[in-house]
Image (tube, rainbow, N blue to C red):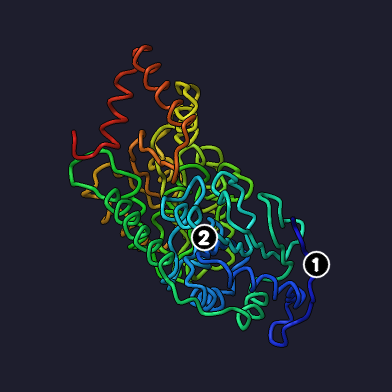
Amino acid sequence: MLEATLPRIGLTVDSMQPLSSPEPALLERAAAMLNAAERVTLLGGAGCEGSHAELLQVAEKLKAPIVHALRGKEFIEYNNPYDVGMTGLLGFTSGAYAIDHCDALLMLGTDFPYQQFYPAKAKVIQVDLRGEQIGRRTAVDLGLVGSVRETLRELLPLLKDKADGTHLSEAQAHFRHARKGLDELASGEPGKQPIHPQYLTAVLDRLASEDAIFTCDVGTPTVWAARYLTMNGKRRLLGSFSHGSMANALPQAIGAQVTFPGRQVISMSGDGGLAMLMGELLTLRQLRAPVKVIVYQNDALSFVELEMKAAGVISFGTDLVNPDFAKLAEACGLFSRYVDDPGDLEATLRAALDHPGPALVSVRVASQELSLPPTIDFEQAKGFGIYLVKAMLNGRGDEVLDLAKTNLRGLF
């Protein structure tokens, strides 16, 4: 049964920003529930902005792993020994593990939409400044209407230090294993084409400035951003994370660059997304905005293809007949390069990032790269099996072979 109350509202003296916290009686109830639980997991979203210190203090007291939703990545992941990754369709296994194995879930500033990734039996406490969000996605045992920072500050003195850190250590071990597997996929061998998008993103992450602003198109660029970009408290990650609108990365990058002219801004553009608003390349030149556009060119709407495969459908209407993006960018007056060899990738990206004006690098990436969710249910596995059979029977065995070569590395 959901219980919530109107928050107490105040103003900070320094910023004059409104802050709020729940009534003391509900804070005491929340503390009692968390103190009684053996295995607590925190799930944080965008509402955790500005609450990093309080979040870590709560995790330390409760010996709780911290899972982040996509919009919480930039505010939670950095300098955080309790972080065990992301969950949801774009996340990876360790985040799902920490939630599946808790008996109390403390949700902080997130409207996490993927209902299949909530725990089946755990008590759920949800903290959100927007009361209408509480209980919207899953059944909630206690709702606390308030800003995350103020709520955690008032909750902290009520929490007892847990002596047993087994749940935390197991979740951390699972995270290390999952992270190792993801990092192994971010590899490239000179002369071995095509370039894996994981490798492209990992190299881009390493070369980007410490306060870079990244934007990412919906679909697979968002997946790779979520899994391979490193947040450090200074970097930003922008995308159409609530609405899933295509072609968002380049316009967002232009807006960010105009707003912060002294910062490095990188657009992780899908080829489908860039093609939808390709005229914005002229805007870059017109504004002389030094945005760096990195094109993940796989000649397909690949995330849609993945969804079709999971449903047992042979892909159709997803192939893209792309232009030469590098030549188009050059015609618009941009620094431009095309790269398809992993051995050339780092030097090409470095040259683009060092260029003082707008730049575009079109990177030929693997078209059959699978971005698997943390868990796969029976219907998804069944659908994928049906797709494989249909593809073979319809004379598309080369597609199946390419799929295997791309994802079963070391066997081919």
Q: Amino acid at mark 1?
A: Thr
- Residue on which the image places disc 2: 68
Q: Amino acid at mark 2?
A: His
x and y percent of residue 109 in the render? Answer: 64, 63
Q: Is residue 299 above or below residue 185?
A: above
104 vs 147, left or right, is left
Quadrant the N terminus occupies:
bottom right
Which residue shows up at 43% across the image and 64% down it?
167
**Foreground residue, 156 or 11?**
156
Residue 282's tag is none
Question: Around disc 2, counting alpha carbons within 10 Å, would you say few (fewer than 14), some (14 to 19), or many (20 or more)?
Answer: many
Seen as rendered, the residue at the extreme bottom is: 13
Which residue shows up at 59% across the image and 58% down it?
255
Q: Is residue 403 above or below residue 72?
A: above
59 vs 131, left or right, is left
Residue 203 is at least partly visible in this image: no
x and y percent of residue 261 in the render? Answer: 53, 68
Q: Quadrant of residue 180?
A: bottom left
**Foreground residue, 47 or 246?**
47
Residue 5's tag is 1
Residues at circles 2 and 1 in contact by the CB criterion of under 8 Å = no
